[in-house]
Amino acid sequence: MQYALILAGAAVAQVANAHEGRHGRLHAKRDVVTEVDVVTVVQTVTVGALPVTQEQVQAPAYHAPSSYVAPSSYAAPSSYSAPVSSVSVAPVSESSSEAAPSSTLVTSVSSAYSSPAPAPSSYASSAVSSAAPASSGISSGNMTPNGKKAGLSGYIGIQEKASFESLSQYISWYSDYTPNTPDVNGVMGIGMLWGADGSPCGSDMTTRLSTYQSMMSNDTVPSIMFGFYEPDCTCTMSADMTTSDAATQWESLIAPLADKGTVLGSPSMCKQYDEDFLTPFKSGITTDWDVTSIHINKPSLDEAKKVVEYYVETYGKKVWVSEFACVNDQPSWEPCTDQTQIDSFINDLVTYFEGSDDVVAYGPSNGEGLGTAWPLTDSSTGELTTTGTTYLNAIKNL
């Protein structure tokens, strides 16, 4: 047993020395649990480019903004080999929730790489140039980012606000309506192609389209990409596209990502369960979406449930609630003003979303047209509002 430990320590030292001085943003961490009481099977685990021989692994089962100028010149590397930035061997803590023998060792291997250029605001985008999407916990079989549903629908620069900092440890994703939303504070940026040819929505749309096209030219493969933003309503707050134009642009721009492993999110609708867009759109495409992106602007839990049920029953897919807000939408659009109603709405919806197998993720809106009581971020201080604090408290103990 001592001989095996000496060999393992030598291998660890060799890996650490081989990559000393390398740096970059942490993207993945893998824990390998090695039993050393009885040596039964020997296998080779490859770490970076260096094989390390150890005893058989016995791992326990753990389970829309007004303006934007995107860095169109950004290009991630076409290929990379993730170096090993650190290798450590330490005994399992006695406070661990799972019992382990005193001789059990945990080997932690952290992989990192250096990007040739920073993403916006010095943050790294979850979209990388690679043969496969960035590791995010998202796949066609499991579309909840890192197993955590709660998120935030924001705007350009929301990650710079104090409100985001307050929420960041309790959410897994956020959106700022651009195709290269950066990851920050461990929160995954979810990309979206807001609009495309056929949309008359001006420079904001064309700038985002240009950014997306640059990403594709650089063979950038995001983990997930959402389609067009409310193409069933008019500019400037929606993409305003015909079903024919949307289908053509989907097949040309978004569908090719499916073969590279990207999860595809449908265009989102502004008309909620009264929409008449997705069915003819679906008949015009050959590459289907994986998850249906939906917006909920309703005043009560019962009405919100109707929106979820409509999309699940109509299109047969799980839903990603990419926006929700308390709005009295009938007979006209009137954002909720009563804070008690808003607080109840948030608490009821979070409980419902968390308990629904049909909902893979959800996030409250922070966009325009939602009045003064709903927005989660104070426009002058950047701090959480009363509504933002209600959402924070609702998700803190999940």
Image: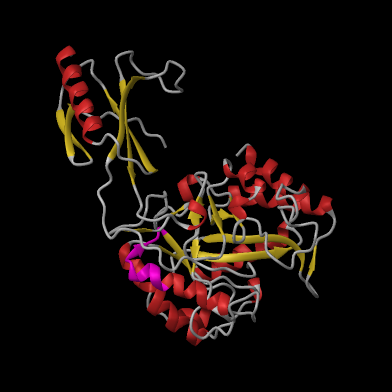
Q: Is residue 58 magenta?
A: no
So how many labels did they put on this image? 0
* Residue toward you, 303 or 363: 363
- Please provide percent x and percent y for residue 291: 48, 63
Identify the residue at image location x=49%, y=55%. Answer: 182
Visible residue check, residue 288: no
Residue drawn where x is 14% and y is 28% of the image: 42
Q: Kindly tell me whether residue 182 is visible in this rendering.
A: yes
Q: Is residue 382 above or below residue 239?
A: above
Q: Quarter holding the N terminus?
A: top left
Q: Residue 38 location in percent, x, y? A: 20, 17
Taking the image as shown, residue 28 lies to the left or right of residue 234, namely left
Q: Is residue 214 magenta?
A: yes
Position in image of residue 267 (x %, y %): 52, 72
Q: Residue furthest right?
A: 338
Residue at the image position 26 percent from the left and 57 percent from the top: 79
Q: How is the image coloured?
A: secondary structure
* Residue at the image position 62 percent from the left and 55 percent from the top: 158
Image quarter hosting the C terminus = top right
Q: Is residue 340 above or below residue 227?
A: above
- Please name whichever residue, 54 or 178, is drawn nearer the observer in this view of the structure: 178
Of residues 58 and 135, the one drawn nearer to the viewer in this rendering: 135
177 vs 378, left or right, is left
Q: Name the quadrant containing residue 253.
A: bottom left
Q: Is residue 362 left or right of residue 259?
A: right
Q: Residue 32 appears at what percent x and percent y? A: 30, 31
Q: Is residue 297 above or below residue 204?
A: above
Start-end of magenta stretch: 213-223
